[in-house]
Image: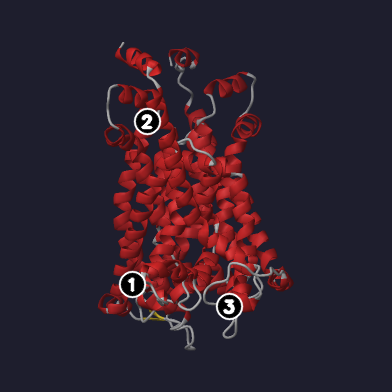
């Protein structure tokens, strides 16, 4: 009763409240914009510097107006071929493998759960807590003896293991959201477990699968530690291309910025376009 | 809810024969096995091999291969000031970055949860640092942003009396931590924002109507609701940030001296500069044991979150 009365009274209230509310809105908006621009500034500066001629990139005070050039981008595109190919193969390959292994596993942890599904889920999460860096020396020796050193297969294998726990966790949460009536109806129609998974569950959770894949892509594309330790040339990825763009001497800031821009833009664009599903994916993975 | 219960199948009365129960159990297990075996093989075997090598004297550049040395690698680890230093710095870097990123994340999420002009654009700008390749972020911060002679930060701070500070020499640890915070605040923002948006609006409205101030509402209603989201952000952030390598390797190379050498970078130098597989393995084993101790507490937290899930559904 009090709620209704108060609301009615507020509706009757004259202007001042409205004006304060409006100015409050504008104020928060300004704060948000300032914070966002400050946060975005390094990215903006990276992109700006990438369009500078090398001589304009290392000046004091920093130059904000200059005649833009594509020279550094041309240089980057002339050398990035093998690196970007390796990165694409490792990223796409490992993401596909993650989904192939992760979807059935999530199914076995949610829809028709195995007896100890809680333990299973905890096991997957716990492998994320073991720092892979701790095993880097032996990993190097194993890769060497298995003739996998400097091979793209090694990166695919390791990136799959790196992303699989998080993916299972996320996909499972999406499967839990599938309405049980839907599953029941499929079962009454005589659908087996495989048909239930491919025909009923997969279409319903496909947006969730997309956001899961997206997060796997981000982590695989950006990974440096394993690539740096276990590859040299035959499987060197984009982060290593970036490192190679820093020479021992001479001016390199514009070139570095161009390479950094090129290396980052694919993931940034994908992330921008799919930010809603990114939020959803993270939140679902986080709570359910 | 009752409708759903009505739709739920009646409890099975007939007891399936023994064989069928076992078949059912295997049918349930089968889809799990490929992933389980894969993860066990790829993530656990390297750690077993690490355990094995931790008792070996094995220098990669010395011919003759590995030979048994008992506990001497461990003796080195426990008496090594370098290891202890790296351990402490790892803890400091991770804790500082995670806590500050979370505080900023909550603040940004509260900002983004309001309606204002260009909300979508602001959210897009704020999440971008998380999407930038960490190696690119590290190199761009080290060069164009923080360089003492032409860096943008020194230029922007000039009005505040800052003149050509060589951030990476004088404030190396702080600089690395700032970059970690910059990259992970968006992640925290996204998780907390999801929590804010899942909050039922009518309880908030009721609180406002009942005359609760904005601050009190936030403390009494919003924060408890956000708690599982915040815990998970902290957990996931810690998992990734404790392994931070790119920023250290590319901004300061662990220096000056060992000022920014964290555990991952320390292990990297043991393998790549000293070729000390045995020593690195022992360091790794100790790291893993410490991690397990911390992770046990973390998993307890997880268990609580799962209970929350049960309560919510």
Q: Chain of mark 2?
A: B
Between label 1 and label 3, give the one nearer the viewer.
3
Callout 3 secondary element: loop
Instruction: Write down the residue under mark 3.
Output: A246
Q: Is residue A230 left or right of residue B218?
A: right
**Quadrant in which the C terminus of chain B appears:** top left
Q: Circle 1 marks a residue in which chain?
A: B
Quarter of the image for the N terminus of chain B: give it.
top left
Secondary-structure class at tag 1: helix
Does label 3 lie on the same chain as label 1? no
Q: Residue A117: give x, y in percent of width and height.
A: 43, 39
Residue B275: x, y in percent? Answer: 46, 82
- Residue B2 in picture, x, y percent from top left: 43, 13
Q: Which numbered tag is attached to residue B86? A: 1
Residue in the picture at 57% in, 24% down = A183
Q: CA distance from mark 3 to mark 2?
A: 52 Å
Residue depicted at x 58% and y 77%: A246
* Viewer-side residue, A244 vs A191: A244
Residue B134 placed where, x, y %? 51, 63
Q: Which mark sits nearer the N-terminus, 2 or 1?
A: 1
Between marks 3 and 2 in the image, the one whose residue lies nearer the viewer: 3
Q: B21 above or below B171? A: above
The residues tagged by marks 2 and 1 sit, at their Cα atoms, a distance apart of 40 Å
Do discs 2 and 1 share a chain? yes
State left or right for residue B59 relative to residue A262. left
Q: Which residue is mark 2?
A: B310
Task: Residue at 58% x, 86% y: name it.
Answer: A249
At numbered mark 2, what does the secondary structure look like: helix, strand or loop?
helix
Q: Quadrant of residue B268?
A: bottom left
Q: 10 Å neighbourhood of mark 2: few (<14), some, or many (≥20)?
A: few
């Amino acid at each position: 009763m009090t709620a209704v009365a108060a609301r009615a009274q507020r509706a009757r209230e004259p202007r001042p409240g409205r004006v304060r509310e409006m100015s409050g809105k504008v104020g928060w908006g300004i704060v948000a914009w300032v914070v966002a621009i400050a946060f975005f500034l390094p990215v903006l500066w990276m992109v700006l510097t990438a369009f500078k001629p090398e001589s304009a990139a290392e000046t004091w005070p920093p130059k904000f107006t200059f005649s833009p050039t594509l020279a550094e981008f041309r240089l980057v595109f002339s050398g990035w071929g093998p690196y970007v190919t390796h990165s694409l193969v490792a990223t796409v390959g490992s993401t596909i493998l993650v989904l192939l292994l992760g979807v059935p596993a999530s199914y076995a942890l949610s829809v028709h759960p195995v007896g100890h599904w809680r333990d299973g889920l905890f096991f997957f999460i716990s492998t994320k807590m073991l720092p892979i860096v701790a095993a880097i020396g032996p990993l190097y020796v194993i890769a060497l003896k298995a003739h996998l050193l400097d091979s793209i297969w090694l990166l695919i294998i390791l990136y799959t293991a790196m992303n699989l726990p998080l993916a299972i966790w996320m996909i499972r949460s999406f499967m839990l959201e599938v309405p049980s009536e839907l599953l029941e109806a499929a079962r009454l129609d005589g659908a087996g477990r495989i048909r239930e998974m491919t025909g009923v569950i997969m279409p319903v959770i496909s947006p969730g699968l997309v956001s899961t894949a997206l997060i796997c892509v981000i982590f695989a594309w950006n990974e440096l530690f394993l690539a740096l330790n276990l590859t040299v040339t035959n499987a060197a990825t984009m982060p290593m291309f970036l490192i190679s763009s820093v020479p021992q001497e001479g001016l390199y800031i514009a070139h570095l910025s161009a390479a950094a821009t090129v290396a980052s833009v694919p993931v940034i664009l994908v992330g921008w376009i799919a930010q809603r599903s990114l939020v959803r994916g993270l939140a679902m993975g986080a709570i359910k | 809810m009752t409708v759903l219960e009505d739709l739920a199948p009646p409890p099975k009365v007939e007891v399936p024969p023994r064989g069928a129960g076992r078949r059912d159990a295997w049918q349930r297990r089968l889809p799990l096995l490929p992933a389980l075996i894969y993860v066990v093989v790829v993530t656990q075997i390297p750690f077993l091999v690490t355990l094995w090598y931790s008792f070996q004297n094995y220098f990669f550049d010395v011919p003759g291969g590995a030979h048994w040395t008992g506990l001497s690698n461990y003796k080195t680890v426990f008496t090594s000031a370098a290891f202890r230093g790296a351990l402490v710095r790892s803890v400091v870097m991770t804790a500082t970055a995670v806590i500050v990123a979370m505080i900023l994340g909550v603040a940004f999420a509260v900002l983004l949860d309001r309606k204002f002009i260009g909300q979508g654009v602001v959210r897009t700008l704020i999440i971008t640092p998380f999407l930038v390749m960490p190696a690119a972020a590290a190199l761009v911060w080290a060069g164009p942003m923080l360089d003492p002679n032409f860096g943008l930060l020194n230029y922007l701070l000039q009005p505040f009396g800052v003149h050509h500070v060589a951030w990476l020499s004088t404030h190396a640890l702080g600089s690395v931590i700032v970059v970690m915070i910059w990259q992970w605040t968006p992640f925290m923002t996204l998780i907390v924002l999801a929590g804010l948006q899942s909050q039922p609006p009518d309880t908030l409205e009721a609180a406002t109507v009942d005359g609760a101030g904005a601050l009190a509402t936030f403390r009494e209603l919003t924060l408890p609701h956000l708690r599982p989201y915040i815990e998970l952000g902290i957990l996931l952030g810690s998992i990734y940030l404790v392994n931070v390598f790119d920023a250290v390797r590319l901004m300061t190379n662990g220096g000056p001296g060992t000022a920014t050498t964290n555990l991952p970078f320390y292990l990297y130098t043991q393998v790549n500069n000293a070729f000390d597989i045995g020593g690195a393995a022992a360091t790794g084993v100790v790291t893993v044991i410490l991690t397990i101790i911390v992770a046990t507490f973390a998993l307890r937290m997880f268990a609580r979150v799962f209970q929350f899930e049960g309560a919510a559904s």
